[in-house]
Structures are given as structure tokens and as C-alpha cells.
Amino acid sequence: MIAGVIGATGYAGAELVRLLSGHPEVKGLALSSVSYEGDRIEAVYPNFSKGVSAALDKAERVIKNSGVVFSALPHGVGEDYGKLCMEKGIPFIDLSADFRFGEDEETYTAWYGKPYKHPDLRAYAVYGLPELNRRKIKDRAAGGRVIVGNPGCYPTAASLGVFPALARGLAGPGTVIVDAASGITGGGREPGRAFHYPECADAVIPYKVGSHRHTPEISRTFAAMAGGNAPGVIFTPHLAPMNRGILSTSYISLAESWQSRAASGAPRPPGGEIEEKTGKIRELYAEFYRDEPFIRLLPPGIAAASNRVRQSNFCDISVHLDQAGTTLIVLSAIDNMVKGAAGQAVQNMNVIFGFDETAGLTAIPSLF
């Protein structure tokens, strides 16, 4: 099968090229880039030399020559290519936000500033978090035409961390608070002052506090995971001085039935009832994610960290309780460029075509 990548020279597009070049079912790549049309991918990214050699063509030719098409374009510009793919019956996996909100054009327009260009395409669209929508992705693909709205990086990390708590009744009625830190590649390849080395080195910088556009995506996903009973969400992103990775810390008020018997609000020393309750919650998480190939639930005493999932499609999760026994603290770590973007897109391709879901994604994380 030939896999096409539109927008192959952005960070997410280049990561797709890297992953797809090692996929056992992908026999060739068709690539496009408006900025570098006519060049070769190995000239733009010399790390691909003697590994990937492909010309950067027009997007329309990529679609014509491909059996699946990935779009790694900015928000609001890829719908025409999605339409072409649906006309040809080619699966279209979009890494922008254009297909993440389904038929909810009002929310998309409010947060991204553009209406849908082709609203009818949402009939083919499904939100591409496999751990939540694997069956929906398969069913839509079986219908002959499918568009996958690949999730955002922050929503992926946060949602995987809280999914079992929402789906199994651990979460109480309170607001879920999500603090997350991302590597600088999350801002894309285009240079800007915020990503200039002197501005972002040696600092952890909150940004778009109370107004980040991943907030409605997180809220929608939480609602789906909770069976429609959406908790409130407060989300605060931070730029961290690292190239790649996300560490998400979620604070979830426990349902009354899960709170400690002596939950007076006063902290208590480790051990005893808190340790026992944490163990039960960890068992619930382990059972919930038992068959998920990319979820790694960490053992007691090990907290999730971004450096241990680097260049992999894994999501590491660790669960903790505050010492009052009323709040579940979940740490979830992903590589924002892999499970948060290109790797998840490849995972969705595997689901669509019935490949082994881990195909092309089995690399062990890099330590450095």
C-alpha cells in the first residue's frame, strides 16, 4: 500500500514519514509540501538520507497515488483534500482539529474562527482516540468511507489518564483539573518569539490560561468517557524547555463511595488506608486497560515522566491519592509527536485496515 502525507515537512508530517517508512504494510510513500514542492524530503530533513527518498509533489497527485492519506496541515485548510479522498473512497486521517468536533460546527467555529467548508463530510468523520472509539472507527471504515479526526496532544494525554475514573464511577461531581506541560515541538515548525531559545529555555511557561482551544475537545471527550455526564474541566497548559513530550497531571474529586472512611480533609502520613485505596484504584485501572497495547500502568512508587516515552506510542500512567483520601491524582505521559500526533494517526490507520494495531509502532522508547 502507498501511504500519502500532505504537509510532510512540518514536524508532525516528518514524524509520519519516519514512522510510515518502517511500517510492514506500507510499500511506498507519496509526499507533498507547499513550502518545498519540487524538493526531496531527504534534502529538507537530511536525517532521512539512505532511509527515505521521495519527491515532494502536489497534494492532488498524492491523493491520486495513495491508498490512505494523512493530512498534517494547519487547522482550517484540509477539508478540500478530505472531500477528494471521500470521492475516491480513500481513508483520510487528519491531524488538525477540523474533524474532531463532528457535527458541532458551533463549537469549532467559536474556538477556531472558521465555519466548516464542507459540513457534509462530518457524516464520514469519527474522533480518532482508539482506546475510546476503536469500534466506531472500524464500523465507519467498513462502510467504505472514513475520515478520522486525530485527537490533539493535550486531550490525548489527559483523556487517557482519566478515562477509567470517568467510566467506572470513581469520579465525583466536581471539576476535573488538568495541568499539563508540553515540549516545544507542540508549537509547530514555524519560528516565533515564544519558541525562540532565549525565551523558552530554563523556564516553564503557562500560556493561554483559561482559554486554550484544546479545552472544549477535552470536555467533549470527558463527556463521552463518562457516558454523557460531563464533569467541569479546568485546563492549564505549560511550555516546558524540552523538545518533545507531554506530562499531564489530572486532579479528580473521588465519588463519595471511593473516599476514605476518615476523609476529614486533614492530611495523614503515607500507608494504611490511603495505600490500600490507591492499590484498589490501580487494580481498576489495570483491568480497564488490560488489552490496550500502548497503555503502560506503572507500579507503585514510579511516577509517569515524559522522558520514558520519548519517540514511542506509549502512554505511561501512574495513579496516586492525596493524603486526605478525597482526590485522585493521575499522571499521564506521552510523546506529543507520536501518541499525541503521528503515532496515533498510524495506530488509526492500523485500525481502519485491520492490521496489527502495533504495526510500525513497536519501537522501545529512547532514553535520551
Image: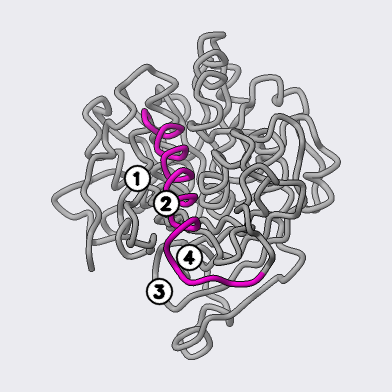
Q: Nearer the viewer, mark 3 or mark 1?
A: 1
Which label was assigned to residue 296? Answer: 1
Cβ atoms at labels 1 and 4 below 8 Å apart? no
**Looking at the image, is mark 3 or mark 1 earlier in the sequence?**
3
Cβ atoms at labels 3 and 2 below 8 Å apart? no
Tell me which secondary structure the magenta stretch mostly adopts.
helix
Q: Nearer the viewer, mark 4 or mark 3?
A: 3
**Looking at the image, is mark 2 or mark 1 earlier in the sequence?**
1
Give how far apart the Cα atoms at labels 3 and 2 are: 20 Å
Up/down of 67 relative to 312, above or below: above
Judge the density around disc 4: few (<14), some (14-19), many (≥20) Cα neighbours within 10 Å.
few
SS label for mark 1: strand
Read off the magenta span.
266-291
Which residue has dot 2 on it? 317
Give how far apart the Cα atoms at labels 2 and 4 are: 29 Å
Please identify the residue farthest to the top as the structure is shown. 143
Q: Amino acid at mark 1?
A: Arg
Give how far apart the Cα atoms at labels 4 and 3 are: 15 Å
Left or right of residue 342: residue 328: right
SS label for mark 4: loop
Which residue has dot 4 on it? 189
Q: Residue at x 68, y 45 (%)?
A: 255
Instruction: Residue 281: say if magenta.
Output: yes
Judge the density around disc 1: few (<14), some (14-19), many (≥20) Cα neighbours within 10 Å.
some
Q: Amino acid at mark 4?
A: Arg
**Looking at the image, is mark 1 or mark 4 earlier in the sequence?**
4
Up/down of 248 relative to 317, above or below: below
- Residue placed most toward the observer, 292 or 323: 323
Please identify the residue farthest to the left as the structure is shown. 50
**Looking at the image, is mark 3 or mark 2 earlier in the sequence?**
3
Up/down of 262 relative to 323, above or below: above
Which residue has dot 3 on it? 242
